[in-house]
Amino acid sequence: MTSAPPKPVAEPGAILTARDVWVGVQVGKIIKPIVQGGRLTVPQGGILGLVGESGSGKTQFVRAMMGLSSLEPGVFSGSAIYKIGDQPEVNVLDEVEAYTPFRPPEGDELFPQRMRIGFGWPLWRRRFRKRLDLLRRLGVGFIFQNPTGALNPFLRIGTQLQEAVLVARPNANRKESEEGALHWLDQVHLKADQHTLGLYPHELSGGMAQRVMIALALACEPKFIVADEPTTGLDSHIRLEIVGLLNRIMGQGALSGIVISHDLPMVARLCDRLTVMYRGRVVEEGPIEALGDPESDSHPYTRELKERAEALARGRQKHSKGGVEKTGGTGVVVGKGCIYRSRCAIYRDGLVDKERCNTIQPEMNLIADEHRAACHCEDISDALKQSGGLFGEAASG
Amino acid sequence: MKTAWLVGQKVGHFVSVLFLSSLVLAGLLWFSPGSPGKAREPVDFDEIAVGAEVCVAATTCGTLKSMPAKAPDDPTVDDGFNFIKKFVQVQLPEGEQTVESGDVLAPGPSFPTWFFGVFWKGVLIWDIGPAFNGDPVLDVVMLGAKQTLPIVFGALIAAIVVTLVLVSFLTWLPFPSMRGLLRTLLLILSISPVFVLGFLMTKAGVLPHPVLWWVAPAACVGILFVGDSSLGEFLLQLENEYRHLRSRDYIHAAGLRGASLFKHMLPGLLLPLSSMSAAKIAFLLGSVVIAENIYAVQGLGTLSLRAATKPDPLLLLTLTVFITFVVALVTLVRDLLEIAIDPRIRKGGGH
Amino acid sequence: MDPNNLIHRDPGEESEDATLAGKIAQGALKDIITTILRWRHADIRLIFGTIVLLLLVGFRIAAIFIDVDTLETHLDVGRSSGFSTGGGFQTTNCRPVEGLLLGNDRNGYSLTATLVEATQAFFLPALLSCGIALFFGTLLGAIAGYFRGGLLESSTKLLLTVIASYPRLILVIVAVGFFVAYLHDPGRAVGMRLFLMAMMLGVAYVPVLALAIYQKVGAFQREQFIEAARAHGLSDVRILGYHILWANCMPVLARHFFYLFGYFILVETSLSYLGPEYGVPGSIPSWGNLLAGCSKGELFSAAVMAPSVAIVGSILGLTFLGDAIGERFERGRT
């Protein structure tokens, strides 16, 4: 009996549910999978932090969920369902599997496979404008990574702000939209006057540009915001201000959102849930407290990130022990088994069944209430304590 | 007032390039076999006296020692009907020589006299001198320009419009492989030299029509904007720029805001378009020579061909300087447009 | 095969079972395979361009030995005088003759032979113009790019702008028409004309090449290794000559070499088409001449199509070759 695959549904109480998202880019004859089976859940009113090293696919994942993938072929599988307020559920990646010529690898395959010629595929991709309109109507906003790149260098920021104001209030006249622009400038702690409105993007400092970016996103009065690396590349004191600003805006509870970063302390401050990506795969999904608590279970990679951040904060250089791959690896890899095993302290110390880690890719197992991690080890926190972590001395297992 | 300074800088650049290019070309012509500095005109003895500078060959000059007189042993009677050979004495560097009066030439102008006195002064008072057919040079040039400039600018506009249409079409076309095929076909068509296209068109029957006067210029425009890789290069560059621009973050951001993408992309496209136009105009003015020849249009191209082989250095200089003027003008317009559109140039960095 | 290094490898996976010699062999083999693999992705442009280049070179060499007379075999062909008067292309002896591969040209000779011999008209002058353009273009571009800021850069840029403000064809016509107008010996005139064509086109192309080199040298100027080299005491000339130009600018030069070669073919054939005062006269075969001569043939006859295809094909092939070689070496460097 052939049946159509079940229609994806949103998780109850979640504003964004993304499942099995695959994003690939064609390199020569193969499809390099940038995001492999990404999953994400943002609860209503919650802020999700998406962390991972650079090259782990965070930005591509989020862009895919918004239908903004500029790669060729980009996102070719999965679902991203938005349930915002009283509006009906919307799957941005609707029908992608019907049009796409590619499918995720099955069984022993390593790379996504082409299953048909897919003449209609460009037609689906071309509908991105409709998808953007859909997102805008739903109330989704995006804060881009590089503030100077995301502002049109030929137009004044006042013009661009007024455009954003018109999104939320389409019937505003010129005076009203100008007032709106000034209001949002004030909200991001910039001087709200005509002079600022008349500035061009290249005349702004990094911090100012980022604030303008945030104002632009807020002026659309969204209910769901995605902030892509909002503090990367800024000086530390500006970083603190921006984080404070975001905290004030997003912490009000009316906004849900995703914050992408590799700055763990900021994520810890801003977010209440955490999703960790490693080399194209999501390895952990859970509450933010799991990050800080050595007693609670957490994926070994998350622990590693935390330890590195702490070591960096303490200013001490620690060298990872031999036999574990140093942090050279970024970028996606494919392969059998758990891709983290080359860096995993638990694997190194033999505290887990190595055969399983070598051959079977771990599923996102439920390790606590609303907390999943992709690891074969049953009691992670114990194992980590035994192994002493990445930098500690190993107790023989 | 940075804008004023920038504009002044660009205008100054325009003037200096124009002047220097005329200087270089004049120098080139001066040192060629057909140099205007050589002595050519026979001297008019009613206007000179003993001691004036005269020449006996193109470059051999000396001082006049005596007025024309017949040879002492010549028995012919000077009664107004007989032709009497008269002779003069000329002091040359190698010594005194007796030369037939008809062979004595007036010396040619010196370079500054010719370049500044004849040419540039002529430009300023709008009267340079006669061309090889007797008409004033400037009239001849302007007549030719009336034929050629519409063709060249028509070809430029046609290239821009057709390229924009093609780029939109190619972007719309959802199948990447067909895009590549179409692009390659256009490239092959475009890489044909202008004269091959023109020749094939005449063979196919597109010939200057006695009644429909616009057929010849239109055909010229057609082969100009396509041939010699004009269309191919335009297409390639514009597609690149468009794709580059399309993937920029601020376009995505504007799309998310629902803003008009056209408004956001226009400045980003206008600048490359004007740069490409400025580069192409020089090329088109060169290729127009051939196009005009095929369709027998009496424009600047045919004129330069004739001036080059006649040879008429003054006409040639005027023609080339005029063409350079048009090229430099388009470049100036492009520079001014860049100043107007791109705020980074106007304001510089700084906050 | 994993050329993009995507498959996950455990650390120390290979070192367990390979001896030292095995590892070295593996490394060398990998290098050889990678080099061959690069050529495996030979795209159609490279193939087409190489074929065209080989054909051109082959024709040119063959042209040394072909004297058009010798290929004419047992044919009773009425020959016209062969000279076309300037401006009026009246010779129309396109009577088809049996037995020849492509038919005969207006003089009654075999068209194939004439096509092959016509490569003589442009091959060596094209090399000359490429040489001039490459030499002066590299010199000026490197100077302007390396010694930035100050009089040297701005004066070089001004000079290049001045040269670039003339349309190239106009410069060539001025030189060819004007300089040769006083030469009355037709034999010398042709040689002089081709020489001047080559020289003028080379000079006119210098700004294009200089701009490309200027940008490349400028980009490298900012790299750290220049500072390091200077600190080591290497002279500017050596840094510029070897490290920047030879090691890094070769793809640019190679690409422009082929572009200019194709462009010279275009110019030479165009001028020969215009007439004997501008290019090669009717008695010497040239593709432009062939087109000009056959005014009575139909659109799709061999006499019309063969020179057209030859011209378009060679320019296309050389342009493709330039593109492909430029891209290939760029890829290999990074």
Image: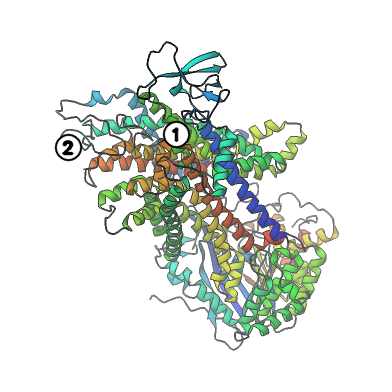
**Name of the residue lying farthest toward the top:** B73
Chain letter, disc 1 residue: C
Q: Is residue A207 left or right of residue B284?
A: right
Q: Is residue A295 left or right of residue C177?
A: right
**Which three-letter amino acid code belongs to the residue tagged 2?**
Arg
The Cα–Cα distance between marks 2 and 1, rounded to whole angstroms, is: 37 Å
**Which three-letter amino acid code belongs to the residue tagged 1?**
Phe
The N terminus of chain B: image quadrant: bottom right
The image position of residue A121, as x and y in percent, is: 44, 67
Tag of residue B228? none
> Which residue occupies the foreground of this view, C113 or C122?
C122
> Which residue occupies the foreground of this view, C316 or C311?
C311
Residue lying at 54% horizontally and 14% vertically, measured from the top left: B96
Tag of residue C178? 1
Q: Is residue B148 left or right of residue B340?
A: left
Residue under pointer 2? C95
> Which residue occupies the foreground of this view, A7 or B175?
B175
Q: Is residue C142 visible from the viewing direction of this image?
A: yes
Foreground tag (2 vs 1):
1
- Disc 2 is placed on an element classified as loop
Q: Quadrant of residue C251?
A: top right
Crowd band around label 2 with a 10 angstrom C-alpha radius: few (<14), some (14–19), many (20+) = some
Looking at the image, tell me whether mark 2 or mark 1 is earlier in sequence order: 2
Q: Quadrant of residue C236?
A: top right
The image position of residue A323, as x and y in percent, is: 71, 50
Crowd band around label 1 with a 10 angstrom C-alpha radius: few (<14), some (14–19), many (20+) = many
Q: Is residue C44 visible from the viewing direction of this image?
A: no
Residue lying at 61% horizontally and 81% vertically, measured from the top left: A167
Discs 2 and 1 carry the same chain letter:
yes
The C terminus of chain B: image quadrant: bottom right
Q: Are marks 2 and 1 in contact (CB under 8 Å)?
A: no
> What coloring was used for the rendering?
rainbow
